[in-house]
Amino acid sequence: PGNVEARTNFAIFLQESTHKYADADQQFQHALAIQPDAHFVLTSYASFKTLIKSDLKGAEALYQRAVLANPTHAVSHHKFALFLRDHRKDYRKMQEYAAKAVQLDPSLAPRWKSEADRQSMWHRAATSWTTCLESGDVAQVLICAAAKMVM
């Protein structure tokens, strides 16, 4: 009953294997009642709140608590960065947390390198689109519009 890790693992099992979401939620809450600053519980519960409960405000607060509770836990930073990208579209903060995750665990670098490449591609496309529109050349604008549709 007092084992935080066991309760967290049981909550994840309930969530993923049995889809007993109310019971999983209760197990996460019990684990946090025992150890409110357990970063692994906070991170797992944040993921649960995002994916199952669609509680983005609650999930964000849990991710923030997780990275504060253990600033050296790469996975908490990594998952918070993903949350910021996918649910908040806050790319500045995403980059901050992703960089910290990679600093803490360099094996995460390939994941974020592809993200940086994708962001760079969209930035280049937006810049060239603006240049196209500013050219005033109708033919050039049509070519750019066709290229944009392909992207």
Image (cartoon, rainbow, N blue to C red):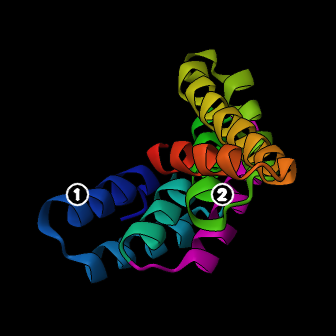
* SS assignment for the magenta stretch, majority: helix
Disc 2 to disc 1, how far (Cα)?
Answer: 26 Å
Q: Element type at marker 1?
A: helix
Q: How many numbered badges does the structure rendering display?
A: 2
Amino acid type for the residue under numbered disc 2: Leu
Q: Nearer the viewer, residue 87 or 61?
A: 87
Q: Label 1 crowding class (10 Å Cα cut-off): few <14, some 14-19, many 20+? A: some
Dividing the image into 4 quarters, which one contains the N terminus? bottom left
Residue 33 vertical placement versus 94 (above, below): below
Residue name at image x 56 percent, y 27 percent:
114
Q: Position of residue 50 (x, y in %)?
A: 47, 69
Q: Position of residue 61 (x, y in %)?
A: 69, 70
Q: Give the farthest residue toward the left.
A: 18
Residue 13 badge: 1
Which of the 4 quarters of the picture holds residue 13? Answer: bottom left
Residue name at image x 18 percent, y 71 percent:
19
| Residue 70 seen in this snapshot | no
State the extent of the magenta-drawn residues as a range: 53-72
Q: Nearer the viewer, residue 100 or 30?
A: 100
The residue that label 2 is drawn on is: 84
In screen coordinates, is 117 left or right of 127? left
Residue name at image x 63 percent, y 21 percent:
105
31 falls in the magenta region: no
64 falls in the magenta region: yes
Q: Position of residue 53 (x, y in %)?
A: 41, 79
Labels 2, 1: front one: 2
In screen coordinates, is 90 left or right of 21? right
Residue 120 vertical placement versus 149 (above, below): above
Q: Nearer the viewer, residue 124 or 118?
A: 124
Residue 26 vertical placement versus 145 (above, below): below
In screen coordinates, is 99 left or right of 44? right
Amino acid type for the residue under numbered disc 1: Phe
